[in-house]
């Protein structure tokens, strides 16, 4: 298959907001994809390269060769080119990688260059999420979507499942191929995800009066722990194996009175008082084994689910049954929880845990099975909403469905000593109406334009919500907002009334940490 076929489909998917229309486009391309091409095409349609690291950065894509006039690139050849880039190392590797990139982009037409740039930068923004792709695979193979989703959960990846389903000769054979994917201790399972609610009451009331499990939501690293005898593996939310980096978790797993188990939970740094340290410290500690535990502070696992126990898979049993098994297995290493049908009781627990430094709660259907890899209604997370009034310092040109618009904004806090301190970027939360308004507004405020980033006069105030503040070496102030999203533009405030960097620092360093 030519890459231009993928590029054309990607552009068409980005141009529509209809999930049905997106799925029809994906199904059409998947049905035209040869079995050996499915892993590559599926990953590209999901907006990712198969190679986790290529060595290419945005700076290397700033100047591209002129696009080719005719499409000639084959998807397997493109995948091979990125694979060659990914294994380059040592002296001269940067020059060799640049030469390969120039050759690849020079052979690409304009639509193909847009696709490749988006894949490399991770900023394709076509709206073809993995869940939508899995539904398209099911449609193309003529099997129920639930069968494909479950297989992908157990495989921990979309590509092998897509290959199995689409490579079968009939729907019956596809179902048989999907049934071969089972839970295997040592192979990571896609984690179950939670939807969001604005407050605890609406989350609890969404379960129509049924009892719910209300878990503490810890601000740590999602971990999935697999043990088979003395063999232990620890995986992250993205299914990376980090076993060698987390010896404390391995030690806890080996001490459990069990032969085989798969556990889901969070790991975080806690001090001697049991209070969580800032997320950035936990993240840094989990990123490398070089950061050994310091006095009184260690990386501790807290489990909230068990998926397998001594030869028995528990994915399909009710949550309450799984929790009973978990409590018997790992006392002292489970998250704090309450079981209630009373929204006031749930809210009191939320307030108590947030005051203790935790991130919020997850409200869970007590009877639900473990359905991984999608944000259904069985788990609902609630966090305290933080907001700031910040100043827009610059804006980036949009791509895909936002082509021709000014989209990603650069956020700055006011420095009482003069100027502004950048805290990050966001394009989240923007409606079509807001995008149109800000494109006109920021064009008026523009002072410089390099073709991608438009620098602005620091006048426009925007109210943003965010989940937390983390330390960052990327920005001069040493801080960055986590998951910032636009709530509204504040025309009632001037830049002189925006929140200061001192306010941001006070939020980043609450008392007791």
Image (cartoon, grey):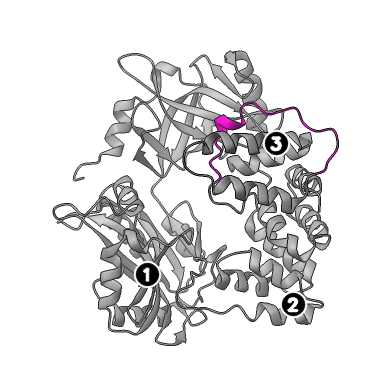
Is 418 placed left or right of 74 in the picture? left
Residue in the foreground of this view, choosing between 12 and 209:
12
Give the overall secondary structure of the magenta segment. Answer: loop
Looking at the rendering, which quadrant does residue 253 occupy?
Answer: bottom left
Q: Which residue is mark 2?
A: 174
- The secondary structure type at the circle numbered 2 is helix
Dot in front, 2 or 3: 3
Separation (CA) of disc 3 from disc 1: 49 Å
- The disc at residue 3 is none
Q: Which residue is mark 3?
A: 103
For the residues bearing labels 2 and 3, Cβ distance under 8 angstroms: no
Q: Does residue 430 appear in this view?
A: yes
Is 392 placed left or right of 251 in the picture? right
Q: Which residue is mark 1?
A: 304
The spot of residue 221 in percent (x, y) is 37, 56
Dot in front, 1 or 2: 2
In magenta, the rendered stretch is 54-72
């Amino acid at each position: 298959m030519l890459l231009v076929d993928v590029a054309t489909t990607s552009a068409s998917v980005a141009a529509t907001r209809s999930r049905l229309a997106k799925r029809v486009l994906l199904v059409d391309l998947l049905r035209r994809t040869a079995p050996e091409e499915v892993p590559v095409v599926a990953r590209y349609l999901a907006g990712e390269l198969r190679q986790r690291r290529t060595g290419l950065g945005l700076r290397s894509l700033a100047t591209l060769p002129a696009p080719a006039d005719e499409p000639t690139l084959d998807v397997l050849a493109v995948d091979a080119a990125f694979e060659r880039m990914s294994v380059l190392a040592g002296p001269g590797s940067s020059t060799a990688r640049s030469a390969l990139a120039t050759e690849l982009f020079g052979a690409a037409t304009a639509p193909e260059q847009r696709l490749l740039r988006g894949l490399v930068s991770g900023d394709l923004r076509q709206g073809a999420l993995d869940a939508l792709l899995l539904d398209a695979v099911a449609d193309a193979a003529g099997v129920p979507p639930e069968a494909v989703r479950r297989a992908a959960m157990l495989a921990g990846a979309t590509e092998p499942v897509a290959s199995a389903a689409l490579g079968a000769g009939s729907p019956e054979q596809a179902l048989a191929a999907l049934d071969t994917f089972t839970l295997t201790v040592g192979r990571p399972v896609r984690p179950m995800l939670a939807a969001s609610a604005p407050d605890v009451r609406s989350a609890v009331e969404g379960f129509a009066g049924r009892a719910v499990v209300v878990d503490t939501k810890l601000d740590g690293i999602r971990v999935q722990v697999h043990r088979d005898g003395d063999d232990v593996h620890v995986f992250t939310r993205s299914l990376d194996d980090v076993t060698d980096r987390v010896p404390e978790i391995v030690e806890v797993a080996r001490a459990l009175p069990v032969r085989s188990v798969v556990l889901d939970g969070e790991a975080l740094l806690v001090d001697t008082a049991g209070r969580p340290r800032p997320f950035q410290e936990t993240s840094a500690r989990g990123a490398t084994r070089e950061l050994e535990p310091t006095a009184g502070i260690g990386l501790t696992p807290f489990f909230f689910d068990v998926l397998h126990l001594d030869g028995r898979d528990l994915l399909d049993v009710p949550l309450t049954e799984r929790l009973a098994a978990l409590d018997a297995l790992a006392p002292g290493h489970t998250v704090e929880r309450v079981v209630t049908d009373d929204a006031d009781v749930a809210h009191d627990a939320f307030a108590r845990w947030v005051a203790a430094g935790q991130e919020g709660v997850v409200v869970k259907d007590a009877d639900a099975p473990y359905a991984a890899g999608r944000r259904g209604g069985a788990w609902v997370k609630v966090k305290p909403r933080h907001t700031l009034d910040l100043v827009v310092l610059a804006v980036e040109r949009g791509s895909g469905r936002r082509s021709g618009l000014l989209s990603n904004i650069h956020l700055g806090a006011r420095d009482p000593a003069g100027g502004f301190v950048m805290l990050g970027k966001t394009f989240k939360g923007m409606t079509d109406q807001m995008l149109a308004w800000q494109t006109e507004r920021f064009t008026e405020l523009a002072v410089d334009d390099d073709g991608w980033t438009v620098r602005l006069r620091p006048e426009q105030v925007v109210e943003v919500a965010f989940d937390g503040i983390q330390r960052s070496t990327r920005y001069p102030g040493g801080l960055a907002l986590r998951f910032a999203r636009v709530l509204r533009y504040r025309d009632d405030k001037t830049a002189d009334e925006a929140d200061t960097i001192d306010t941001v620092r006070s939020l980043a360093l609450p008392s007791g940490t």
